[in-house]
Image (tube, coloured by chain):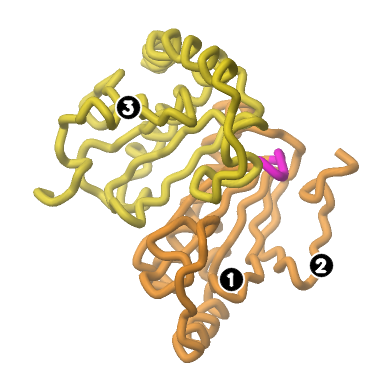
Chain colours: A yellow, B orange
Amino acid sequence: MTNCVLCKDQLKPEEGEIIWRGDDCRVVLVNDPDLPGFCRVIWNRHVAEMTDLTHGERDHLMALVFAVEEAIRHVMHPDKVNVAALGNMVPHIHWHVIPRFTDDPFFPGSIWSTKVRHTPESVLSLRKQAVLELQSAIRDQISQLY
Amino acid sequence: MTNCVLCKDQLKPEEGEIIWRGDDCRVVLVNDPDLPGFCRVIWNRHVAEMTDLTHGERDHLMALVFAVEEAIRHVMHPDKVNVAALGNMVPHIHWHVIPRFTDDPFFPGSIWSTKVRHTPESVLSLRKQAVLELQSAIRDQISQLY
């Protein structure tokens, strides 16, 4: 779809970077300064809902989502992982996979809730260091799927 | 876990009602006056993350989540479906499956975002009528899985 931002296969640097790409999906490391390690798993084709996919496609996509969750847990040691497919603004299937920490700006709210604190810079900086390992950890997890 | 609200197998009437129960999961119709048709699929055992489940358990749970989505789409004709597992407040796996409408109180934000409008009572009332069909539609969808 020409007016869908996720149908474009290019990211501006401030949006993040593609860290894995397959025939059906891609994984993006989102550049959110408050939430290091935030990833998106995007279905390449323009489809709005999970139940628009075949059962096999759903399984494939969820296996990737959980591979990303596995890598995030291994590298970032979050207090919780949030997994969500909303798509109200961009109705093109994309899963948010978000490491959450009790000291992140929104905890225990959703990342779409009101910001309630600032994470100390020193803590954020350690998490941003960990993200450097996340890219290869995600690729490793996905390579174990096939 | 004795202090986890989802380990209790009883719901107060204001929380909603259990509309399907299996050995591993249950489906609850949430009683949210702003969001008719909002359902939760809850893993019965106390587990925090999807990747704490085996691959087979994940597949089983997601098949139920998407069966609920299918029924919601069929009965409620939402503008979008939101699917999310957060668990920051209650770290016991539960999936929110939420029919979203462009005139609901939060659209296009998440349901955890700030309320931006009131849905007209007449519209809400029609949606609440539709919810009466949702219970059997969900049970039918689930019965087709096995």
Residue type pointed to by label 1: Gln
Mark nearer the viewer, 1 or 2: 2
Residue type pointed to by label 2: Lys
Q: Which mark is residue B46?
A: none
To which chain does the residue with label 1 belong? B
Q: Locate the N terminus of chain B and report the quarter of the image it occupies.
A: top right
Q: Are marks 3 and 2 in contact (CB under 8 Å)?
A: no
Q: Give the range drawn in magenta.
A: B88-92
To which chain does the residue with label 3 belong? A
Horizontal side, residue B121 vs residue A44: left or right: right
> What count of labels does the image hold?
3
Residue beneath label 1, please?
Answer: B135
To which chain does the residue with label 2 belong? B
Horizontal side, residue A94 vs residue A62: left or right: left
The residues bearing labels 1 and 3 have C-alpha atoms spaced at a distance of 37 Å
Tell whether position A116 is magenta: no
* Residue that appears at 45% across and 15% down: A131
